Amino acid sequence: MSAPVAQPQEGPVNRRLAIHGLSHAYALRTVLDGIDLDLPAGRTVALVGPSGCGKTTLLHLCAGLLTVQKGTLENGFLRPSVMFQQPRLMPWKTTRDNIALGLKALGVPAGERSARAEAMGRAVGLDALALDQFPHALSGGMQSRAALARALALSPDLLLMDEPFSALDVGLKGQLHRLLLDHQAAHGLAVLMITHDLMEAVRLADAILVMAADPGRIVHRVELTTPARRRGDAEVYRTTAELLQHPAVCTSFGLEPPAADPEADADGGCAVLPLRAVGADGGATPAPRKKGFSC
Amino acid sequence: MSLLRAWLAGIPAYLWSGWGAVASLFLLFAAWEGASAAYGALILPDPATVFATLAGLIDSGAAWPELATTARRALIGLTLAIAAGSTLGMLAGISMTASMMSRPLVTVLLGTPPIAWLVLAMLWFGASDGTPVFTVFIACFPVIFVGALQGTRTLDGHLKEVATVFRLPARMKLFDLYLPHVVSYLFPAWITALGTSWKVVVMAELLSSADGVGAALAVSRSHLDTAATLAWIAAVVGTLLAVEYLLLEPIKRELEGWRRQEGSAA
C-alpha cells in the first residue's frame, strides 16, 4: 500500500502538481478511481461534479491531510495553501490574528505579520473594525473573505479551494472571483478548485475536469482558451450552456439528457439555449442582470 | 496588560450585578435566624452572635495565622494538582489510547472518598504538612485531569486540519489551538477544584494537624463552642466566596470574551 509521495523539490522546473492513477478507498468503499491530473504553475483547474463524487477527498489528498493509498501524487509547489468550504476561523482569535495565522507559523515577526494581515484584510474588503473583531461577530460573507485573506496572506504558489464561495450571494461571489483573478495575475499562483457551480468553474478556470460518482472518476475534460480575466459574461454563459449540453456532464449530475441532438449542440447550437434553463436544470447560479457581476 | 485593564474596568459593573446573589445570601441569613430562634443558641447561635465571635477572633489576631496556614496547605496541594492534572490530562487527551486507558483510573480516583486518602496520608506523612497537602492534591487531581482531557478531546477536527495545512509548529499548535480551547474546559475545573481543596484541607486538618482552621474547629468542638465553630466555618466559606467571585470569575469572563460574543451574535 506504500505509494510514492514526492517531496517538494527545489527549482522552478518541478513547480507542478502531477497526479497519476490516484485511487482512494474508505474501508471497502472506493471513492476515487484512476484520477489523472496535471496542474502547472499559474494555471487554474476546476473540478466539478455532483456531491459525494470524491472531490473533497481528492483535495484533502493534495493538501496532505490524507495519505496516498494507490497511484502517485507529486506536489512540487513550495508554499501550498488551502481555503476550506467553511471559513474555519479560530473563534478565540481576532480576524487580524486569524489572517496572520500562516505567517505566524512561518516565523514572521509580530509587527510585520500584523501589517501584512491588515493589508491582505483590506484587499479582500475588511475594514479596521472587522479586523479587530472575533469571527463570530462577522457575517458569513466577511468570514469567507477572512478565510480567503488567510489563504492568500502566505503568498502561496498553489491554492487549493474546496467550494470556497458556495455560501455567498452572487454579488459577493463576483467580488471574490475578481480578487482571486487579480491576485493570480499578480503572483502567478496555481489554483485547484472544487466547485459544483459550473458557471463559477467556467468563469475562473483554464481547464475544467468533470467528475462522476461511484467511484469518483474524471469523465470529461474541457480546456478553455480565452484567459479567465478576459472572459466576458456572454462567453461564460455560452460555455456553461455548452457544458450542460454535454452527455457526460448530464449523466454525471443526473440530469435529463438534452432534447436536441448532442451532435448538433457541439456545433454551437446551444447558443440559443435559454439562460433560465441553465439555472433551473443545473443548479448553477442564475444569470445575473447587473453588469457589475462580471469579472 | 490590556487584560488587567479590562478586568479592572469591568469590576464596578460586575459588582453591581452581584445584588441578586447578595439578596439570596440575606434570605439564607433570615432562615438561619429563624432556625436559631426555634432551636436555641446552644444548637444554632444566631448570625449576629456568630459574626461578632468572628470579629472577635479577627481582632484578637487569632484568625489570620490559622487561615494563612490553611490557605498555604490548600494552595500548595491545589497548585500541584493543577500542574499535574492539566499537563497529564492534555497529554492523555491527545492520544486516543491514553484517554481510554486513563478513564477507569480517574474514575477510581474520583470514587475513592477523600477521608480514605486522608487515613493513608496520616500513615505516610504523620502530622506534618504533607498530610493535608497530599489529601488536597489527590482530591483535586482527577477533577482537573478530566477537564483537561475533555477539553483536548472535544477540539474541532476542522481546526486541526487548518493547523496541519498551515503547517503550525508544535509550539503554536499548543498555544494557538489547544490551550485557548482547553482553557474554557480547564477553568471551570480549576474553580471546582479550588472549592474542593478548601473543604478537604479543613477536614484533613481537623483530623491530623495541630494548627490551621481545621485544628481550631476541633478545639471549638471540644469546648462545645457552637458560636466559635460557626465563626470558623463562616471564615472559611467567606474566604472561598471572595476568591471565587472577586478573582476567578472576572478572569474567566475576560478569558472567554470570544465565547460571550458568540452568544450575543447567535
Image: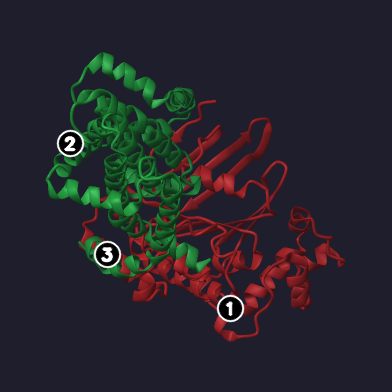
Chain colours: A red, B green
Marks 3 and 1, the one that precedes in the sequence:
3
Task: Return the x and y of residue A139 as percentages of the image width and height.
Answer: 50, 70
Is label 1 on the same chain as label 2?
no
Residue A38 vs residue A275: left or right? left
Residue at image location 54% in from the left, 57% down from the top: A85
B100 lies above or below A114: above
Is label 3 on the same chain as label 1?
yes
Residue at image location 57% in from the left, 80% down from the top: A293
Residue B69 shows which numbered tag? 2
What amino acid is labelled 2 in the image? Thr
Identify the chain of the residue marked 2, using the numbered disc in the image. B
Distance in Å between CA atoms under marks 3 and 1: 37 Å
Task: Return the x and y of residue B101 as percentages of the image width and height.
Answer: 47, 23
Task: Say which of B258 and A244 sits in front.
Answer: B258
Image quadrant where one finds the N terminus of chain A: top right
Q: Are marks 3 and 2 in contact (CB under 8 Å)?
A: no
Residue at image location 55% in from the left, 63% down from the top: A205
Residue B72 vs residue B191: left or right? left
What amino acid is labelled 1 in the image? Gly
Which SS class for mark 1? loop
Q: Which residue is mark 1?
A: A232
Identify the chain of the residue marked 1, using the numbered disc in the image. A
What amino acid is labelled 3 in the image? Ser
Distance in Å between CA atoms under marks 1 and 2: 80 Å
Q: Residues within 10 Å of mark 3 (few under 14, many from 20)?
A: some
Q: Are marks 3 and 1 in contact (CB under 8 Å)?
A: no
Which SS class for mark 2? helix
Which SS class for mark 3? helix
Identify the chain of the residue marked 3, using the numbered disc in the image. A
Residue A114 shows which numbered tag? 3
